Image (tube, helix red, strand yellow):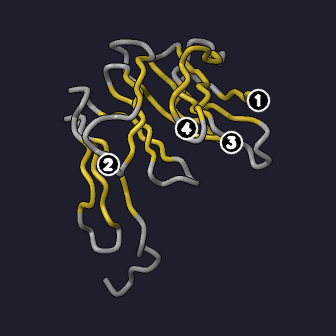
Amino acid sequence: NTLEFGTEGKTVLAGHNSGVITAYDLFNKNQVTQLPGFFMSACNALARVPNDQNYLYAGYSNGALAQWDLRKTDKPVDHVLINEGIPINHIYYHSNALYVSSGVDTAIRLDLQIPEGNINAEAPTFLVANDCQVAQFVATPHNDSIIAVGNWGLCVRFQY
């Protein structure tokens, strides 16, 4: 399209009900990668590491949280079950940690083992969300805290 600009070299990711994840070249609209439906469950949430475009984190409707390497797409590099059988609502990457929302009562911070980015789920930090479902996490402009918003008027700031 002659009105299109700024799309060259950019990709967009899509999680599907089948559990498959696809990546598309935004400039030419071609599919460049497909990750299998490894968990046989819908992919509900995706997060990418800004400074390393090879790694991707995906949340599934069965409660699985997976780390994928886009260079090796046959199986996840690492995965954990957050709340087995309860969907992952949202994943947010910030400062070598994943902020994960699952169901109506689980919001956690999981540290990542750098440089590989593996998920350290042995000692999660539970974030108090007053039995509300977190729909979105975002970092504050000065990067000193995370804000979570969700249902029933939830708006909480977490310092880390």
Mark 4 residue type: Tyr
Looking at this view, is 128 or 32 the one in front? Answer: 32
Q: Assign the N terminus to one quadrant of the image.
A: bottom left
Return the disc, 3 or 1, that comes first in the chain's sequence. Answer: 3
Name the quarter where the C terminus is drawn.
Answer: top right
Residue 139, numbered circle: 3
Q: Which numbered disc flags the more N-terminal residue, 1 or 2?
A: 2
Q: Residue at x 34, y 87 (%)?
A: 2
Check the image and report above or below for 134 versus 115: above
**Dot 4: element:** strand
Residues at marks 2 and 3, CA–CA distance in whole angstroms: 23 Å
Give residue 92's mark. Answer: 4
Of callouts 1 and 4, the N-terminal one: 4
Q: Which residue is mark 1?
A: 160
Residue at image mark 2: 14
Separation of marks 1 and 4 at Cα, in angstroms? 14 Å
Residue 38 appears left or right of 149: left
Picture residue at 57% right of the left edge, 40% below the top: 93
Residue 61's x, y, as percent?
Answer: 32, 24
Tell me whether circle 3 and circle 1 mark residues in contact (CB < 8 Å).
no
| Labels 2 and 3: the sequence-earlier one | 2
User: Is residue 1 toward the left or the right of residue 106 in the image?
Assistant: left
Q: Secondary structure at mark 2?
A: strand
Amino acid marked by disc 3: Ala
Residue 49 at what x, y percent from top left? 53, 47
Measure the alpha-carbon separation of dots 3 and 4.
9 Å
Res 86 → quadrant: top left
Separation of residues labelled 4 and 2 (CA atoms): 16 Å
SS at circle 1: loop
